[in-house]
Image (spheres, grey):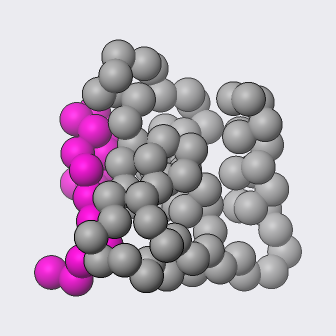
Amino acid sequence: MLKAGAEMTERLLTFPYPVGAVCTGHAIAMGAFLLLSADYRIGTNPEAKIQVNEVLIGLTLPHFAIEVCRQRLTPAHFSLAATTATRMTSKAR
């Protein structure tokens, strides 16, 4: 399953046209990586939680996941997401 997830994120990131993603609820683990792999992201629920939770449950982030986060998040948010598994929401601040 890990290989399939990595291949899917690679396909999204290398797709020759812009990719949009709509998130109607929570995006945890692979859901968060798929959202980050899209070029445009729309959240319909401001209370939805987006989290890279592998670190929180004692797993090591796969290399592809670290690189997706590094590419799509600011350095500060990358650090929060990848090292502390901070839960984020889609609320505008």
Q: In the picture provided, is 9 more to the left or to the right than 50? A: right
Magenta stretch holds residue 30: no
Q: Residue at x 79, y 43 (%)?
A: 7
Look at the image and say whether residue 91 sits in the magenta stretch. Answer: yes
Taking the view exactly as shown, the residue that stands out farthest to the top is: 58
Q: Foreground: 33 or 47?
A: 47
Say above or below: 71 vs 39: above
Work out which quarter of the rendered image holds the N terminus and state it: top right
The reply to whether residue 87 is visible in this rendering is yes
Residue 80 visible to the viewer: no
Q: Is residue 15 above or below residue 11?
A: below
Outermost residue, right direction? 16
Where's residue 38, x and y in %? 62, 69
Q: Quadrant of residue 64?
A: top right
- Which residue sits at x=49%, y=73%? 24
Q: Residue at x 55, y 62 (%)?
A: 35
Residue 4: percent from the left, percent from the top?
78, 37
Residue 71 image offset from top left, x and y in percent: 50, 56
Quarter of the figure that contains the C terminus: bottom left
What is the span of residues highlighted in magenta in the rendered image?
A: 74-93
Residue at 80% x, 56% y is 11
**In the displayed structure, does residue 75 sit left or right of residue 1?**
left
Q: Position of residue 68 (x, y in %)?
A: 54, 49
Task: Using residue 86 as the reference point, say whether residue 26 is left or right of it.
Answer: right
